[in-house]
Amino acid sequence: MLRGGLSIGKVFGISIRLHYSWFFIFALVTWAMVTSYFPSTHPTWSLSMKIGAGLVTSLLFFGSVLAHELMHSLVALREGIHIQSITLFILGGVSQMAGEPKAPRDEFRMAIAGPLSSLVLGGVFWGVFFGLRNMTSGTAQFVSAVAYWLGYINIGLGVFNLIPGFPLDGGRVLRSLMWWRSRNLQKSTKIASNIGRGVGFAFIFGGIWLIFTGSWFDGIWIALIGWFLESAAVGSYRQLLLQDMLKGHVASEVMSRDCKVVSPDTTIERLVNENILTTGRRCFPVVTDDRVLGLVTIHNIKAIPRELWNTRMVKEAMTPLDSLKSVRPDEDLSSVLQILIENDINQVPVIQDHNVIGIIGRDNILSFVNVRSQLGM
Ligand SMILES: [Zn+2]
């Protein structure tokens, strides 16, 4: 659900992204600060002062959420888990990890780091507030007003994330403790994600109740958070089951071996008529003199206008080898799946000693999973 977004730079090698929905929350926080919060706490402030304070508060709020996510990521990096990106969106931040923690202790540290950093930040902001609140200068008033709200929101962020429903941080802490005691990751994840679903439903019902009792805005917000929690809880458990099923299996077990190779100088028209329409295959290694030049897929062909099919050659349409993702025959199935998802592609060639020995796609992995689950394995 978080595909779109802007990349705003890299910190510690992690790319930081803003999802489009984040701009809405930024505008909402600023608007609420300027029109309702500062007018009630500092009625004497001019409008430009309120707008300035609103913008500063929103920016620091954004920095606080980012700091929370970065703390998770820094602990993960220390434990050898690569973090690809952090995306900030309407309900907070999500870190995209390559891999899962290997031991309960790693997961515990990684999970607790975020809420702890929010609580510490909240304490620092409230420290600033208490230090400055009795000073009369305009600057001190400005800083203490902003610091008070940020202290409150960071502590709220820390406490909310400690709710023990997976995949919230608190749910991860709970899972790591159960995992540590039982040594059974799958069972622990199941319990923690069921609690996560329960928390999600509680938020949804609480939100609906608020909508009907008049606080419709808070109600929609809380129900939305609940819906997000519930689906994330279901999704992360499914993902674990899938990874469990794929564990220990490699690309060569499920790849399609009957790769029909084509020459780079075949026309697209001929490829379509003689190979695609008759065999139903969707993907062909392009080979000359036993050397793989690239891969041509239905996707590549669709990019070429129909009327040019009889003049354009396969070599002009293919994805060349150097920009092509490929896997080794002994590549783990879960990492093959990850490569497909990350690059948004349907198949990759399986290459051994510069030869294409097969093609593996989402459909191969899907039917592998389907057959095993039908057999109850
Ligand atoms: Zn967190």
Image: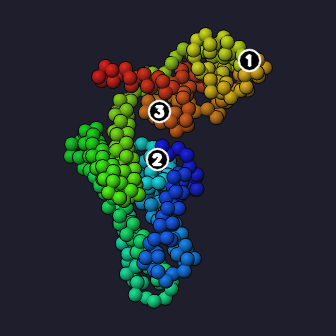
Q: Quadrant of the C terminus?
A: top left
- Local crowd size for mark 1, using a 10 Å CA cut-off: few (<14), some (14–19), many (≥20): some
Q: Are marks 2 and 1 in contact (CB under 8 Å)?
A: no
Q: Residue at x 27, y 40 (%)?
A: 190
- Among numbered discs 1 and 3, the one appearing first in the sequence: 1
Circle 2 residue? 96
3 to the left or right of 285 = left
Q: Which residue is at the front of the view, 211 or 329?
A: 211
Q: Are marks 2 and 3 in contact (CB under 8 Å)?
A: no
Binning the other alpha carbons within 10 Å of mark 2 as few (below 14), some (14 to 19) or many (20 upward) gives: some
Q: Residue at x 47, y 54 (%)?
A: 90
- Decide if residue 204 is on the left or right side of residue 326: left
Name the quadrant containing residue 272: top right
| Disc number placed over residue 267 in the picture, else none | 1
Q: Where's residue 143, x and y in %?
A: 47, 79
Q: Are marks 1 and 3 in contact (CB under 8 Å)?
A: no
